[in-house]
Image (cartoon, rainbow, N blue to C red):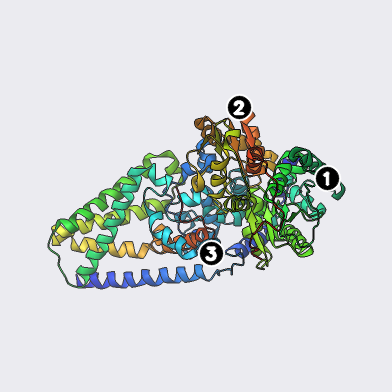
Amino acid sequence: MSEIDALEARLAALTDEDLSRGLDLFRAKLGGAEAAYLQTCVRCGLCADACHYHRTDGELASIPAHKLAQVAAVFRAHYTAAGRLAPGLTGARRFDRDMVRAWVDAVFGRCSLCGRCSLNCTTGIHISAVLRAARGTLTEMGLIPPDLLQVVATSLETGNNMGISREDWLETVQWIEEEMQQDVGDPAARIPVDKQGARVLFTVNPREPKFFPLCLQASATVFHAAGEDWTVASEGWDLTNYGLFSASPAHGGAIAANLMASMDRLGCGTLVIGECGHGFAAARWEAAEWLQKRPGFRIVSFLELMEEYFQQGRLHVDPAKITERATLHDPCNTVRHGGIVEPQRAILRRCLADFVEMTPNRAENFCCGGGGGQLSMSRYRQKRLQSGGVKAEQIRRTGARLVVAPCHNCIDQLMELNREYKLGVVIKTVAEVVAEALVRTTAPSREESHVPDAR
Amino acid sequence: MEALRIGVGICGLGAVVALAVQAARASAFGIRPLHAPAAGSATRGVLYAFGPGMSPLAKESTRTHPWAYALGVAYHLGVFAAFGYLLLLLLGVDVAPTAALGVPLLAGALGGLGLFVRRYASAPLRGLSVPDDAIANLLTTGFVALAAARLRSPAAEPALLAAAMLLLCYVPLGKIRHCVFFFLSRRHLGRHFGRRGTFPVRH
């Protein structure tokens, strides 16, 4: 049975008991904030153009207010007097099979949880938070696209979302270390593994060892140049967390626990999340809520750390090394949901001779279309590529030949957009740009670097 | 007339109680304690959400729809003016016709009418709409228009009071309850994005 049919079969087999349980699950996901959001929409429709799906398909069902209305309809029908007494008046609808199907389409098929609608809502509804609650409900009802669930399952089974074995990971690290030694001309350059008490534990998106080893090499080069006391972990090194996309705290918490266990095992002071938007949002913001525990260490984005190195004078770059026009893509989970807005800009202004912003940018950025787990849901591929047309046009308008994207999901989507829309651009991480612009100096020893440990 | 005024008072009290109950019920869904250390300030986020974040320039959705925004602002000013005027009438204070009151009332009525036309002239907005949208708009716009009429002629007062009763009875049932939930939502939104350092938005 295909992935698509498997989900359809589950939808068709829903029983009244399933629906009743689903309603209980939904109720459990609502806090005071969501209950307020669900009663605030005035259907002004001004959110429509905020959504990259609606901008590219023009469909009513892609308007954020329409997606919100699917969830609000159920809330009204079951939890408000007006919805129970006069459902037709306010559009209240009970949680039946048709509504579940509408939810699946709205929250998996037409939403990357980018949150742009939330910032554009005239009444202040955090729409993506509501849609996330609906996603979580569907996931716990077993109504998640199977390929998205498979990524979560692979993480839970193997410790990383690509099922890379420990041996392969360590071999790759060793190989990259050798490449870096040649590149920087320093045989003492290291990618330390499981170094107890290192100041920094660096975590990686499995796409780097699997497909983009130069990204990992670039990060290692930056650490080497900064003279950082760092390490990677032999286990629990994957920063990704598709629990953010399944919206299941059980998934998210179990995956996040891998990173927390690595920190505990190695006794590092700072957990550094490599360039990955959702990985950062999951580790920095959601993990503590999933695990119901405040982390006992600092969690930062590699972007923040690199900018700290620059401010401390530990990195030296020559912007004349990269002269082509470059622009920056703002990953939604790094910027809008993550609050990391300026460090990447400060870094690129140092490293690039011709850096231009996209319009709009920062918290107003458009999603590339690859967020929210869309890259792993094959049934929505065409919709994803179509929705990415907004980002493609943004890139084209800058005239840039280099697009810097501090997120591997975004990079994958941008690479597809590059082909689909014939953009003719090169896509790199921020660390790759920094490594390329570095002016080689003797790396400072640990004793020479004075970085306050925030532990 | 006195009976109508008492009726308005009762309906108003009922609306306030119903809205308070609804807000309390929403709050009873609970506030989850947050464990992730804040990167920014929740308070600053709330201040932004209720301050610069309300500016038409703060959001693309309002920047690119200035007419809809202007209609909305006029409509809400008219509603506030009409309720203020109603309160004065209930207290027995008869205000002489002045532009300070007449202009917002007239602008409000026109704003409401404009939003009604906008909603039903636009296919996507029609698609989003439920009967509540039409009823809420007509009741509110009618109320504001009757307030403007009462300002010119005391003969319109019974109609104004009757419209006020209808409106106040309807408030807790449909979208007009955003008069309370707007504040709750914006506060939650501001706290969330303020903690994360996204608010205030830098352009």
Q: Mark 1 or 2 closer to N-term? A: 1
A251 sits left or right of B83 in the view:
right
**Vertical position of residue A302 compared to residue A24: above or below:** above
In this view, the residue farthest toward the right is A167
A449 sits left or right of B126 in the view:
right
**Vertical position of residue A211 compared to residue B130: above or below:** above
Residue A142 picture location, percent across and down: 72, 53
Q: Nearer the viewer, residue A202 or A207?
A: A202
Q: CA distance from mark 1 to mark 3?
A: 57 Å
Amino acid type at mark 1? Gln
Read off the chain for label 2. A
Q: Mark 1 or 3 closer to N-term? A: 3
Amino acid type at mark 2? Gly
Q: What is the crowding at mark 2: few (fewer than 14 residues within 10 Å), some, or many (at least 20)?
A: some
**Vertical position of residue B6 compared to residue B118: above or below:** below
Residue B55 picture location, percent across and down: 37, 52
Q: What residue would you read off at disc 3?
A: A79
Residue A336 picture location, percent across and down: 54, 51
Read off the chain for label 3. A
Q: Residue at x 64, y 44 (%)?
A: A407
Q: What residue would you read off at disc 2?
A: A424
The secondary element bearing badge 1 is classed as helix
For the residues labelled 2 and 3, say whether their Cβ atoms are less than 8 Å apart.
Answer: no
Q: Residue at x 41, y 68 (%)?
A: B19
Q: What residue would you read off at disc 1?
A: A174
